[in-house]
Every structure is written in C-alpha cells, then in structure tokens.
Image (cartoon, rainbow, N blue to C red):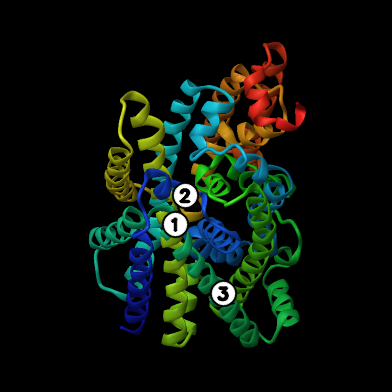
Amino acid sequence: MVYLIITIGFMLGLACIGIMISRGIKTSEDWMVAGKSLGIIPLTGTYFATLISAAGMVSHPGYYYLNGWPGWWNCAGTILTSFIACIWIARRLRRTGYNTYSEYIAGRFSEKLAIWASFLVVICSIVMLCAQVMGGVAILQTFVDWNKATCCIVLLLVFIAFTAIGGMKAVAWTDTICAFIIICGVWIMAVFFLGEVGGFTAMNEKIAAINPDFIKPFSVKIPPITALSWVVTWGFCNFGAPVFVVRFLTATTPEVAERTQGINAICLFFFYLPLIIIGLCGMIILPGIEAQDRVFLSLVTQKLHPIAGGIMFAAVVAAIISTADSILLLAAATFSNDVYAKFRKVSDQEQLKVSRIATVVIGVASVALSFFMEDAILFIQAKSVTLMGSAMAMLTIVGVMWKRANKAGAVACMVCGLAAACIWYALGEPYGVMAALPGIIVSLIALIVVSCITPPPSDKVIAKFFPESK
C-alpha cells in the first residue's frame, strides 16, 4: 500500500504539471519540438531521462548482477554518445532548423528515403515502447494484484495522457523532474547497499570470492569483441534512434544543444556508477536470482524500508514514463508530419489532431506486442535501437560531417546496414558479436563507397548543411 500511494501520488503530481504546461500548446511545432524553446535545464533533463528508460532502471542492475564489472561495457557507449554529440553532432543538427528527424533525412538526402525512414522509426518505436510497457507491468505487479491486461490498460492511459496533452514541452519538464528523482534514488540505494556489504573494497573482495572474472574488465561471457559490440550498440546506434536525436532539434540555439550533451555525459556517468554498485551488491546481499529483470525489484522489496522502496519505485516509474512519453511523441509526430502530411494537404490544427490520434493507436499496438515478447527488457530495447541505428546512424553522423555523402549513398547505407543487422540476428549473433557492430560497419562502408562513385549533392544542399564552406 505504501508503494502504491507514493507511486500514484508521484504520477498525479507529474500529470498536474503537464496539464499546466499544456495550456501553451497552440501549434503542431509547439507540440513536436516545444517551439524550439528548450534551454539547458529542460533539454538536459529530457535527454537524460529518455535515455534511461525501463531498461536502465529495471534491467541494467540485473545485467551487472549476472556479469559483474565486465557488464559495465553495456553503458559505456551511452556515455560515448553524448561526448560525440557534444563535440561534433548536436550543434550541426540544430542549426538545420528542422522539426523531426525525417525532415532532416528529406532535406539532406531524399524525401522518398525519409518516408521509408519514417516507417522504420514508427515500427521500431512501437518495439521500444513495448519494453517500457513490460517494465511498467513488472513494477505494478510488485505491489498490486492485477493481471497483465489490467496493468497494460492502466499504463497505456498514463502514457497517452502524458504525451497527448502537453507535447514536447510538457514531456521535457516532467522528464527533468524524473531525472532528478532517478539520480537521487539510485545513489541513496547504492550507498545503503555499500554499507550493508562493508564498503567498496569489501564488495569487490566478496565478488571475487564468488567469481574472479567478475572483477576483471572482460570475462568469458563478455570478451573484448562483445564489449566493443555493446559500445557500438549504444555509442553509435543511438544516433539512428530519433527519440534521442530529436532532442537536439528542440534547443533554443545550436550552442545550447551542444552544451547539454556535455552535461549529459557527466550525468550519465553519475547514474550508471551507482546502478552497477546496486547490481554488484545485490550479488552478495541476495544471491541466487536467475531472472535479470527481477534483480532490482527483489532488492527493493526485500531489502529496503517500504518508504525508501516506494521512492525507488517512483524513480523507476519516472524512468519508464519519461521514455514512454518521448517515444510516443516521436512516433506520433513522425507519422503525422512525415507520413500522413506527405500524402495529403492538411492544416496545422488537423495535423495536431492526427498526432494525438496516432498517439493512441501506437500506444495500443505496443501494449498488444508486449504479450508476445519474452526477452529481457534490456535486449528488447537494444534490438530496436540496433535496427534503427544500423540503418540510419551513419546518415546522422556522416551526413553532418561529410559534404560528399549523397542520396545514392544514403539509400545504400540504409538498405545494407539494416540487412546486415537482420542477417546477423538470424545467424544467432556468432562469436559473441552483437548485430550492431556488423550493421554499423556495413552501413558506413556502403555510404562512403556509393557516395564516392556517384555524383555529389547539389550546391543547395551543401550550402544549407555546410554554410562554413561558402
């Protein structure tokens, strides 16, 4: 009952904030990109909270619990993403002035390619949202005696309410609140568990007694090639996941977009460090858990005071809501702006209405899919990001860095990268190499080779994306 009261109270508080902010939503641009009005604080908060997700809060501690310190490689890439974005990508994307990722693809390469990219974004977004639904169900069933269908309906209503009412601006500010709670929650839990096991040094000594591989940088299960695969999955494929990239487009200025990524890299480090400590301490405090997604929930319910546990569940709900509303917003905006509006002429208000309807339809689809998914939440999200990233990450990175990248190269990049990742999954990811690594390599080679043997982009495209070359 304590868990339920704290969690419901937290969600109601967020809902009230979202409703107040939603009063300023007048146009589709307000809804999609907050009228490009986000400063450093809300932009940092929404990017951070969206990256964390159910995978970060529910599934990552279990991964560290089962793999020890070598499991750290699965988050190194996420931190790398923000460093790369800060140094090279965020400023260049924001200065294009586009509202969606598909608009960027259309302007930089081809409108037809952008439509196909939009379909891929919507499909993979449904899979990513499915992972958030599964995380939410796991949380709800921890403290209420509801079946999965009931939990899904409740979660769907919450996700849709947070997204459809307030759009990007409401999402950004509620995400910022969630980010604060998430970081505070995981640090409180990590410090508590370190005290339980006798400190950092004692934790490592006890882990080494369980399995000496768990205190090494690599292990039999996570050799260097698998570690590299994790870094590529999150470090580069995230640039093909518009739910993250679109954050750059909402900044007030290109400089703000750039600075927030530097801040995010630091915030992510200070999030994942306590998270791995939680997983490692859990190995000592509560041994014998086999299901990856049950580790965090078991530690909270069995080892924390109910009030502290309620706060931690509120932090998890914060992570889930912040990612779910961002994914729903992205998918709905992509469908209305980059698919629906391309096939018929619509007014701004009609587009806003279609976006909100799409929010409901996509939410229902993700709930339906959750009944057929059996993987751990972490791997469901990794697969969806891998497929998008293999097809589109190089279009983002290379597209804003290299003038010679052209339409033909972009088509080859998408087709070959996506095909390579799918084939690698079909082969069962041999040699411990995750599909992101061959997907990214093949897409990069295809983009460079085909661009070099075909005509360069038009002067108009080069002038827009590379104004410094004039």
- First of labels 2, 3 by sequence position: 2
Tell me the distance, in whole angstroms, between the alpha carbons under discs 2 and 3.
Answer: 33 Å
The residue lying toward the viewer, choosing from 197 and 4, is: 4
**What element does badge 2 sit on?**
helix
Of the two numbered discs 2 and 3 in the rendering, the one whose residue sits closer to the viewer: 2
| Vertical order, 305 against 454 (above or below) | below
| Residue hosting label 1 | 169
Q: Nearer the viewer, mark 1 or mark 2?
A: 2
Q: Residues within 10 Å of mark 1 (few under 14, many from 20)?
A: many
**How many angstroms separate mark 1 from mark 2 (CA)?**
8 Å
* Gap in angstroms between the C-alphas marked 3 and 1: 26 Å
The N terminus sits in image quarter = bottom left
Q: Position of residue 242 (x, y in %)?
A: 51, 42
For label 2, the residue is: 35
Q: SS class of the residue under badge 1?
A: helix
Residue 419 visible to an observer of this rendering: no
**Discs 3/1, front:** 1
Callouts 1 and 2 close, C-beta under 8 Å: yes
What kind of residue is marked 3?
Val
Kindly identify the amino acid type of the residue bearing the numbered disc 1: Lys
- State the image coordinates of residue 209 (x, y, percent, origin top left): 71, 74
Q: Quadrant of residue 245?
A: top right
Q: Earlier in the sequence, mark 1 or mark 2?
A: 2
